């Protein structure tokens, strides 16, 4: 399930009970951009996007595939150039310099920008979030 908030974004304020369950509240902030949220169970396809489709990004995509497999997640990971992104993507992992272009191409996907092609903390956090069954929130 994707939640797209147009015009007003919702900021989740974490209120926690003992045992770690959220009883959250929402706070509407008009100064934030729209964000896409995907529940972990709705994520079936992660696209590792790049500018041209070869080189460092291919190594990053293969590393992400291994991380997803090791976490025993039933999620496909594919590698595509940003210009070839399609609406089938649930989450797009993309270099921060191409993140806006990816969001414009597939506005229904959660965008996870990264800086480092290998061992980027954002990519590691994405896998940890999905493994924990938590929602993935677009970073842009």
Image (tube, rainbow, N blue to C red):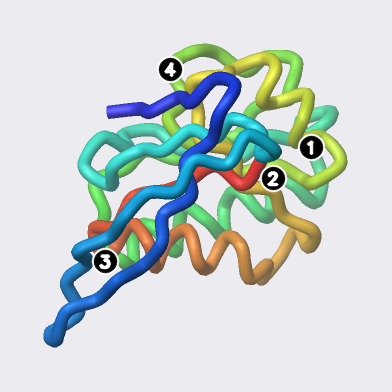
| Residue at 55% across, 29% down | 8
Res 47 visible? no
The residue pinned by badge 3 equals: 132
Horizontally, residue 30 falls left or right of residue 4, namely: right
Does the CB distance between marks 4 and 2 fall below 8 Å? no
The quarter in which the N terminus is drawn is top left
The residue pinned by badge 2 equals: 58
The residue pinned by badge 1 equals: 54
Does the CB distance between marks 3 and 4 fall below 8 Å? no
Residue 83 x/y as whole percent: 75, 15
- Crowd rating for badge 4 (residues with CA inside 10 Å; few <14, some 14–19, many 20+): few
CA gap, disc 2 and disc 1: 6 Å
Q: Secondary structure at mark 3?
A: loop
Q: Secondary structure at mark 4?
A: loop
Question: Which label's residue is closer to the chain start, 3 or 4?
Answer: 4
The residue pinned by badge 4 equals: 88
Task: Give the label, 1 or 4, closer to the camera.
Answer: 4
Res 113 visible? yes
| Residue at 29% across, 63% down | 131
CA gap, disc 3 and disc 2: 26 Å
Task: Give the label, 3 or 2, closer to the camera.
Answer: 3
Horizontally, residue 21 falls left or right of residue 107, namely: left
- Crowd rating for badge 1 (residues with CA inside 10 Å; few <14, some 14–19, many 20+): few
| Residue at 46% across, 38% down | 46
- Crowd rating for badge 2 (residues with CA inside 10 Å; few <14, some 14–19, many 20+): some
Residue 94 x/y as whole percent: 69, 41
């Amino acid at each position: 399930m994707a939640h797209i908030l147009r015009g007003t974004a919702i900021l989740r304020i974490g209120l926690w009970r003992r045992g770690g369950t959220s009883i959250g509240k929402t706070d509407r902030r008009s100064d934030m951009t729209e964000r896409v949220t995907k529940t972990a169970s709705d994520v079936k396809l992660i696209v590792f996007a790049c500018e041209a489709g070869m080189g460092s990004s291919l190594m990053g995509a293969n590393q992400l595939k291994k991380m997803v497999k090791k976490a025993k997640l039933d999620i496909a990971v594919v590698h595509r150039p940003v210009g070839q992104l399609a609406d089938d993507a649930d989450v797009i992992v993309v270099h921060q310099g191409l993140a806006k272009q990816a969001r414009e191409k597939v506005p229904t996907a959660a965008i996870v920008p990264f800086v480092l092609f290998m061992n980027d903390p954002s990519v590691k956090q994405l896998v940890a979030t999905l493994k924990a069954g938590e929602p993935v929130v677009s970073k842009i």
